Image (cartoon, helix red, strand yellow):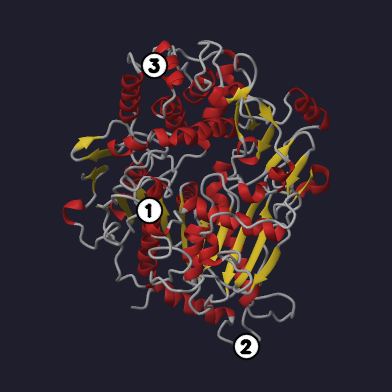
Amino acid sequence: MTTTKTAIALAVALLLGACGSDDDDEPEVLNQKPAYLGMIASASYDGTTDDLLTAGLGASGLAAAAPPAYNDAANPTARELRRNAIFANYRAVLDIAANSGYGTLYGPNVNAANVATNGSGMVAGTEYLAYTDDGSGRQNVTLMVQVPNGFDPVNPCIVTGTSSGSRGIYGAIGSAGEWGLKNNCAVAYADKGSGTGLYTFEDDSVNGQNGVRTSRTAAGKNATFAPDLTDAQRTAFATQYPGRVAFKHAHSQQNPEKDWGKVTLQAIEFAFYVLNEKYGVVAKDNTNRLVRFTPANTLTIASSISNGAGSALLAAEQDTTGLIDAVAATEPQIQPNKTTGYTVRQAGTNVTAQGKPLLDYSSYAALYQPCIAGGAGRCASLVQKGLLSGNDLASRQADARARLKAYGWTADAEPLQGAHALTNILVAVTYVNAYGKFSATDNVCGFSWGTADATGAPVPFTAAAKASSFATQNGILGTPIYENSAGGARLYNLGVSPSTGIEDQALDGFLCLRSLATGIDAVTGAALTGDLAAQSARVRAGMAEVQATGNLRGKPAVIVSGRADALIPVNHASRAYVGLNASVEGTSSKLRYIEVTNGNHFDSFSNALPTLIVPLHVYLFRALDAVYANLKNSATALPPSQIVHTVTRTSNTVPITVANVPPIAATPGASAITVSGTTVNVPD
């Protein structure tokens, strides 16, 4: 069936001369570089010695036990940093154990038809990099477009790959990036204004766009991140707090999350510019190119995972010019702008809580998950504060699990609560700083950032760690240092709270963060006053800037989430977003929701915890396949919303098969998720 979009594409092609018309009277539309883009760097890769997807490592190289070595660890080259960044980021979002499905169900050697091959999976093509900025050099969000040599100008497509977590520009290389490249689409990446921007105070050094370290002075406006400090302020902080660091997501003072949708749209615009420069007809002035590819004749899917998936949804909400045709998002970190006006039910019962903001539930988890993970001191201090019950460790941990469940986590996530303790610690400290737009020197709630020795005492980053930071760090650089620890600054997990005298993983600091997130004292429940009230107002204003409306503008969309997600609970994110969308779009909505049992936020757990977890990654590709098929032919319907019941393994020595991760059903029957008015009904 010829779609309306195909008909429009043909008309546009004829209008713009893409079919080779020589009519001198035909109007020309020149390809113009977006004003927000800086200098564009490009490099082509042959698909043999180097490539877009694996940096020349191939499927086997990405699965190697150790990253490739640098010729000079103190001075890695830009090409080496790119290679190792792809190595690290690919493995961060995928389980690369063969028995978990790498190489058989997914991986570079598994082709677009989802068939495993004996190939390396390398993809030849050209990569383009640029900053989007307002001219100040303070934003410098990195955008990247990868165009595979197999890109088909007759059937053009673009897929977005906005980074997950706080990762740099290669953060989505193994997720949406891989699917796009395998399907011969251009991939439009963005690092969201978080990215790997390490700043070290002592030597005033920064990362360049290509990861190479240089001084802040030498970088000028081209640093990935440089804090807004005078040299006197920098020197004073370095003297008082030696070895501490700052990083972009927490300390840019931009609240980058408020722009995640915008920069995803800008990445798409960058992709259109690149494609028209590469394939457009030369204009009559023999200098410029004509516009050949437009939103009317190019299929564009917004996609990614986690924070990148949330960015895709926000971009679709903010898309007023028709850049995006559809969305395929996995485990999105998305924050509904209200918790009421819709209802989420599981097995006929209203869930215990829904639609809470990220910092609300992550700061709550940062209190209780360390206790569940075995932190006896944290448990004891929570009891002392009246925030936990129990006379021994086991009963206290049971109460902590019960409190998290009451706060909105699913029962399926309970076995993984302890495993997420560090992650929510990092989220709580990072996002309080980001939302409040605090300076790197503010040490909010007593926390700075750095590394430490075996005693927990802060020590500087090594020269090699700084040099390789672009490739090895995940965008959250270092670990929280609790400056207020009794006896002196210590790594947070060895921090002693002044109010309790217990080594309780810096509970006082995390109670402070929790208070800033909610506006009330986490212990007494009283309203905050003074400086804390002012700080909290800043934080909560930042939280409000990032919330989603739920209006996808009628775009086809598939959201996939794991029911066992203990980091981004489905009741607060995906399920709630489906309800919010229903309250806004009603029966005109084209959103589908796929919930996968035994699916968790981190696929690496499928190898470490094979009896609990299956890899969710395969369902991202299935969602993308479904959306793409629907766009190509509207008669191919999107799958209905549903629960996919997976089967875990008995051990990680047992290879995973399709039987463990069954396909999304065309007719889910009793497993169907339904939306009745504004009520989302999820079966068990």
Residue 602, how many percent across, how many down?
43, 46
Residue drawn at the location 32% of the way across and 35% of the way down: 414
**Relative to residue 669, is residue 421 depicted above or below?**
above
Q: Is residue 167 left or right of residue 577?
A: right
Q: How many marks?
A: 3
Q: CA distance from mark 3 to mark 1?
A: 35 Å
User: SS class of the residue under badge 3?
Assistant: loop
Q: CA distance from mark 3 to mark 2?
A: 77 Å
Residue drawn at the location 41% of the way across and 63% of the way down: 106
Q: Nearer the viewer, residue 639 or 117?
A: 117
For residue 138, say whether it is visible.
no
Where does label 2 land, which residue? 23
User: Which kind of residue does numbered mark 1 sit on?
Assistant: Pro
Where does label 1 land, which residue? 615
Q: Nearer the viewer, residue 185 or 486?
A: 486
User: SS class of the residue under badge 2?
Assistant: loop
Q: Residues within 10 Å of mark 1 (few under 14, many from 20)?
A: many
**Relative to residue 572, is residue 454 depicted above or below?**
above
Where does label 3 land, which residue? 387
Residue 579, how many percent across, how many down?
32, 43
Q: CA distance from mark 2 to mark 1?
A: 55 Å
Q: Nearer the viewer, residue 217 or 656?
A: 656
Q: Residue furthest front?
A: 653
Q: Is residue 234 left or right of residue 556?
A: right
User: Which kind of residue does numbered mark 3 sit on?
Assistant: Leu
Residue 260, how many percent across, how many down?
54, 47
Residue drawn at the location 61% of the way across and 54% of the way down: 85
User: Which kind of residue does numbered mark 2 sit on?
Assistant: Asp
Q: Nearer the viewer, residue 407 or 421?
A: 421
Frontmost of labels 3 and 2 is 3
Position of the C terminus by quadrant: top left
Q: Is residue 301 left or right of residue 388?
A: right
